[in-house]
Amino acid sequence: MPVPDDRWYSEDHQWLQVDGDLYRVGLTDYAQDALGEVTMVQLAESGVRVAAGGELGEVEAFKAMTDLYMPVTATVVELNTALAAEPTILNTDPYGQGWLCRVKVEQRGDVDGLLDGAAYRALIGVDA
């Protein structure tokens, strides 16, 4: 199960990656695998500020429905509109085309409080 080292991870299984002046938020491969085939993704609207740990949206799959949580306090700038038409992108490419949204982080220091790749692998019990 891949865990790229070029991003940070929350214990709620979301990832955060630098994307220019913004950050991309996504769902980890571990989380999408646990959910099974994703059938719907619903996210907060663009322009909405979401506090760290606040609800960013939800993902519905054949196995379960789960809430998505914002890893850091941020404002949603852009949604991945491709997920509305093809939600299974989360399953097939969770670290690439399956990103959820782009956000503007309020405090860059909050990112440092997230897990790096090694710490996230330890959390989910996966070897490097």
Image (cartoon, rainbow, N blue to C red):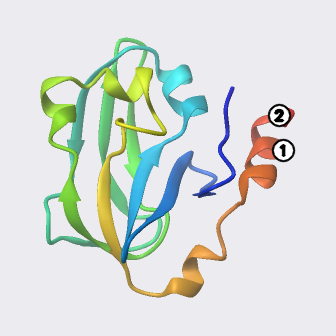
Residue 125: mark in rendering = 2
Q: Amino acid under label 1?
A: Ala
In which quadrant of the rendered view does residue 58 lie? Answer: top left
Q: Does residue 113 sit above or below 87 in this rendering?
A: below
Residue 97 on image: x %, y %? 35, 36
Residue 26 on image: x %, y %? 43, 47
The residue shown at (50%, 59%) is 16
Residues 45 and 67: in front is 45
Residue 24: mark in rendering = none
Q: Amino acid under label 2?
A: Gly
**Secondary element at image label 2:** loop
**Secondary element at image label 1:** helix
Quadrant position of the N terminus in the picture: top right
For marks 2 and 1, give the CA distance.
Answer: 5 Å
The residue shown at (62%, 56%) is 6
Q: Are marks 2 and 1 in contact (CB under 8 Å)?
A: yes
Quadrant position of the C terminus in the picture: top right
Residue 49 on image: x %, y %? 25, 75
In screen coordinates, is 83 left or right of 15?
left
In screen coordinates, is 77 left or right of 12?
left
Q: How many numbered marks does the figure carry?
A: 2
In which quadrant of the rendered view does residue 89 lie? Answer: top left
- Name the residue beneath numbered marker 1: 122
The residue shown at (58%, 86%) is 109
> Which residue is at the far front?
20
Q: Does residue 14 sit above or below 39 in this rendering?
A: below
**Label 1 CA crowd tier, 10 Å (few <14, some 14–19, many 20+):** few
Residues 97 and 124: in front is 97
**Label 2 CA crowd tier, 10 Å (few <14, some 14–19, many 20+):** few
Q: Does residue 109 sit above or below 60 in this rendering?
A: below
Residue 74 on image: x %, y %? 35, 75
